[in-house]
Each structure stands twice: as structure tokens, then as C-alpha cells.
Amino acid sequence: MKTHSYLRPIAATLLAVLTSGALFAQTSAAAPDETPQQHDARMAWFREARFGMFIHWGVYSVPAGEWNGKTEYGEWFLEQTKIPVSQYEKYAAQFNPVKFDAQAWVQLAKSAGMKYIVITSKHHDGFGMFRSDATDWCIKSTPFQRDPLKELAAACKAAGLKFCFYHSIMDWHHPDWATRRAWNDKATGTPDMDRYVAYMKVQLKELLTGYGPIGIVWFDGEWEKPWTHDRGVDLYNYVRNLQPKTIVNNRVGKGRSGMGGMDKGQGVGDYGTPEQEIPAMGFGPGVTWESCMTMNKHWGYNKNDQNWKSAEVLVRNLIDCASKGGNYLLNVGPTSEGLIPGPSVERLAAMGRWMKVNREAIYDTEASPFPKLDWGRCTRKVSGKDTTLYLHVFNWPADGKLIVPGLKNTPRRAYLLADQRHQSLTTGPAATGLCVALPATAPDALSSTVVLKIRGDLRIE
Ligand code: JFZ
């Protein structure tokens, strides 16, 4: 955004090659229908947002991870238990999330500092969490009857959050998905992928015309054989024709390289999707990415999974993503009653308390200019001739001296973001960089932010 945009694609490619050590194709190049400037404008809200909520919700929340004495299941319940589709369908009759409150979910996300919500409109089990005219295998077949996506779209609009949906390409339920499962006892005839794509497009048209502006379509399940690069290009264009401003992730195509999530070779889509990991380094300016991660071990609700990450880990993951120029998409798995689990709510509240103080060090920041910092991470903002460095201190120095390695500038001001009066901290040159004198104890155990205001170009050796 702040580089000369006509140079951006070249600079981004060079930087990606230099920093990642591998020849990754760019997932952030402008689509054929737009200039690099138009692409930047379309991606701007997403790059500024840095933090979103992922919601995996479906009828698999009824068994809640348990089957036949085993307790390890989540949203892959159908594939992993291999129960007949006709039997799995019965969970729909038990799905009645009467405690669902769209405004409460959106407020929870908003007060955590999240700027967008991505919810499963359809996961791999094919079940539609919205009232679709294309099939009965959707929320219409539950006692609930309401349309949770309509309610969430309205609540997001009112709260100023972007509403987005996850839509699985792979579909274990639909008879035309060509790698049909042996346990799909409902399917007859020969699978026909063209017919399947037509079905998927009807549902996507419903979602892209009946739920207001859609921030992102987050595709997934693209890795099986029946899905091809050409089908990916066609689907990408289909979505953008319906809503030109919508952002589409790279799982619409076949370019993604494993859990690292970035494209290798021929890609489609607007950004890369690392899963359950944060890249060791960023990919340079102009490459857009988002790490999606769980709070415990499952995406979908699992009543026995108490492997919760601490608020400290979650806050530091968010900072880690921002320091590398990426977004953090943090998952919750609501119950079949319509509740977000208590441990998730507690952690989101803790993140919100942290964000209230430190938000300016996360939103609309750029990646760290330092390859590595022993004590934490860094984000930065550039405006005109001024640079602000946000030093995220994870490990508070015992001797009160924070060394910023190789920094040659003399900051105009240094202060703690948690200090409402912004009292100046003393800085001075040290043998290995700039030394910032800190108080004895950290203002925040999760991470404390030191702000450095610098005039002129950054000088780092
Ligand atoms: C996918 C989904 O399968 C999963 O249920 C969840 O929705 C997650 C966000 O995305 O996870 C994957 C995708 C691909 C692989 C593994 C998990 N893979 O190729 O090994």
C-alpha cells in the first residue's frame, strides 16, 4: 500500500524469493480484471484488520466428538466414523441451537478486537448452515428453522464487522462429488462434477446475493482429485462477478502447498492460508496471508477437548502474525445449543483486554524490519517521513535494558503504550544497537509494548 504500486509485484516476488528461500508463486497478484492499485484497494481492509474469528459450526456438534467409545472426532466426524450418510443425517433432527444469539457472538468477537467473522456455510459434510433452496440438507431440516447466517450477517453489519463464509468444495454428502464415499448410502447413479459445480454455484449465488456484502469467501477441501485448476479459476471468477469486492482465499485453486498454505506453482485466489502454523518469516510486502488456528485441538466442537492454549500464547500468536505482515484467524467451535464454549469466551475476553491497550500496535501495521528479536517481536507504521516502531516485549529484561539490535536512529520519543501519560523512557546508543531503559516490571505479563517514534529513514545495521 505504501510502496509504489507499479513496483509492487516485482518487489514482492524478489522479496518472497529472498526471505522464504523457496520459489513460491504469489497468491496476492492482481486478478486479471484489475490493476495492482485496484487490487490493493480491494485487499486494504483485510490487511489492516489483522485479526478475525473463524467459526466451525454444524450438525457434528450434536455428537460433540464422541462415537463408539472414542472421543477424538470433530467436523470430520462423518469421514472418520464412516457411518452411513443416512444415519449421519439424523443428527440434523437433533440440532436445535435455541441459545444461539448472533449479537452476542459478534459482540464477543468485536470486544476481542476481531474485525471479521468467517463462518462455515457448508463444511465437508455438505450440510448448509443457511436456508438453501438448492437442497434439504441444510438448516431447514432441523427443528431450529431460523437462518443463523442471516442473523450473523445482520449483527456483523450493525457492529461494523465484515461477514465472511467458509464454503467447502469437497462434499461427502452430495452424490455428484466424484470421489464418492463407500458409506454414502443415499447416492445413486454416476457422479457428475459439472452437475456438482452447478449445485455449488446455486448455493454460492444464494450466499452472495442474500446476505449483504461478503468480505471473504474462504474455500477449502480443494485437494481431492476431482477439483482442478481450471475449475478453480472458473469458481474464482464466478464469485468475483457476483460481488466484485469480495476477497477469495487461495484454496479455491490447486496451488496450495501443504499446511504451509502458500502457493507453489500455478495458484488462484487473493491470499495464502497457513493452517495451524505461523510462518517462520513473512513473505515481503504485497504478499497477503492469514494463519488459521484452533484454541484447543479441534475446529468443530469436541466436548472432551480441554487442550486450551493460554491467553498468553494466543496474544503472542496474534503479535507474531502481525510482525510478519499476516493475519490471525482464530477459531471457535460452538455447541449444538448455540453457545461458544466458556474457555473460548474467557480467552477472547483476555485478548480484548490486551487489545484495548495495544490495538494501535496491531491494526494497519507492517511487518518488522528486524529478522529476529530475542525478547519478542516488532511491528511498524510509516506515515510520511515518520516511522513508529512497536516493540512487543515478551521477555522483560531483568536488568531493565532493552537492546534493539542494530538500530542506529535516535528516537524522538520512547514510551510504554500501557502508560496513559506516555512518559518518556530514556534511550541511548549501546554496543549492539539502541538501548531503551525500562521500569523494573512489565506492565502486562502477556506482552508489553514499547513505542519508538523515529523521524527520517530507518537505519538498521
Ligand atoms: C481443513 C479442513 O479439512 C478442516 O476441517 C478445517 O476446516 C480446516 C480449517 O481446514 O483442514 C485441512 C485441510 C487440508 C489438510 C489437512 C487439514 N491436508 O491437506 O492435509
Image (cartoon, helix red, strand yellow):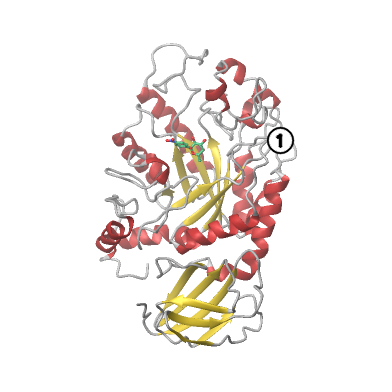
Residue 109 shows up from this direction: yes
Q: Residue at x 60, y 20 (%)?
A: 88
Looking at the picture, how far across and down is residue 337, in whole percent?
A: 72, 36
The N terminus is located in which quarter?
bottom left
Residue 107 shows up from this direction: no
Q: In which quarter of the image is residue 318?
A: bottom right
Q: Which residue lies furthest to the right in this view?
A: 99
Q: Measured along the vertical axis of the image, is residue 206 above or below residue 140?
A: below
The C terminus is located in which quarter?
bottom left
Q: Nearer the viewer, residue 120 or 366?
A: 366
Q: Residue at x 74, y 36 (%)?
A: 98
Looking at the picture, how far across and down is residue 346, in whole percent?
A: 71, 53
Q: Measured along the vertical axis of the image, is residue 303 above or below residue 285?
A: above
Q: Measured along the vertical axis of the image, is residue 156 above or below residue 387?
A: above
Looking at the picture, how far across and down is residue 125, in whole percent?
A: 53, 27
Residue at the spot of label 1: 97
